Image: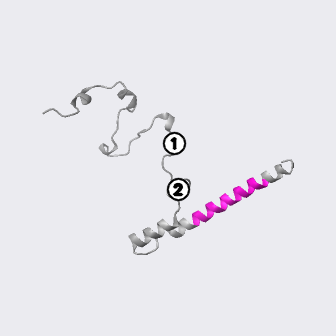
């Protein structure tokens, strides 16, 4: 019996050569030492796909969801990262308040016709 994808596996693809590493494919677990690899095309170099856990940008902080998780998963014990998260949320909120206040002051002077 023939495998379902035998035709697609045997067909060569013109795009394959564009996807290979210029020095040849290197599968790091096959080496006894670290090797240089590029996984992305040059135009995506430096792009951030995942932020650090400590970075709150674009993340939701839901106190009720955290409390529920602590209750259900930890038997009511506080999560060891809670204090650090609360500190980072306070700092983020203070920065946002200062930024908003600064924008409000600029807007207020414009409204009065004052030079900036």
Residue 80 visible at all: no
In the depicted view, which residue is nearer to us: 100 or 54? 100
Q: Indicate the position of residue 23 as horizontal and vertical percent values.
A: 38, 32
Read off the magenta span. Answer: 87-105
**Circle 1: is it few (<14), some (14-19), or many (20+) Cα within 10 Å?**
few
The residue drawn where x is 76% and y is 55% is 104
The residue drawn where x is 18% and y is 34% is 3
The residue drawn where x is 35% and y is 28% is 16
Give the label on residue 47, or none: 1
Give the label on residue 59, or none: 2
| Picture layout, residue 10 above or below residue 62 | above
Residue 15 located within the stretch drawn in magenta: no
| Picture layout, residue 93 above or below residue 31 | below
**Circle 2: is it few (<14), some (14-19), or many (20+) Cα within 10 Å?**
few
In the depicted view, which residue is nearer to us: 67 or 82? 67
Mark 1: which secondary structure?
loop
């Amino acid at each position: 019996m023939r495998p379902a994808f035998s035709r697609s596996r045997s067909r060569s693809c013109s795009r394959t050569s564009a996807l290979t590493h210029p020095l040849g494919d290197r599968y790091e677990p096959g080496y006894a030492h670290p090797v240089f690899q590029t996984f992305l095309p040059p135009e995506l170099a430096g792009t951030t796909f995942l932020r650090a856990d400590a970075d709150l940008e674009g993340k939701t902080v839901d106190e009720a969801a955290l409390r529920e998780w602590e209750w259900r998963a930890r038997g009511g014990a506080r999560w060891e990262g809670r204090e650090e998260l609360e500190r980072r949320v306070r700092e983020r909120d203070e920065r946002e308040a200062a930024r908003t206040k600064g924008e409000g002051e600029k807007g207020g002077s414009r409204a009065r016709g004052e030079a900036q």
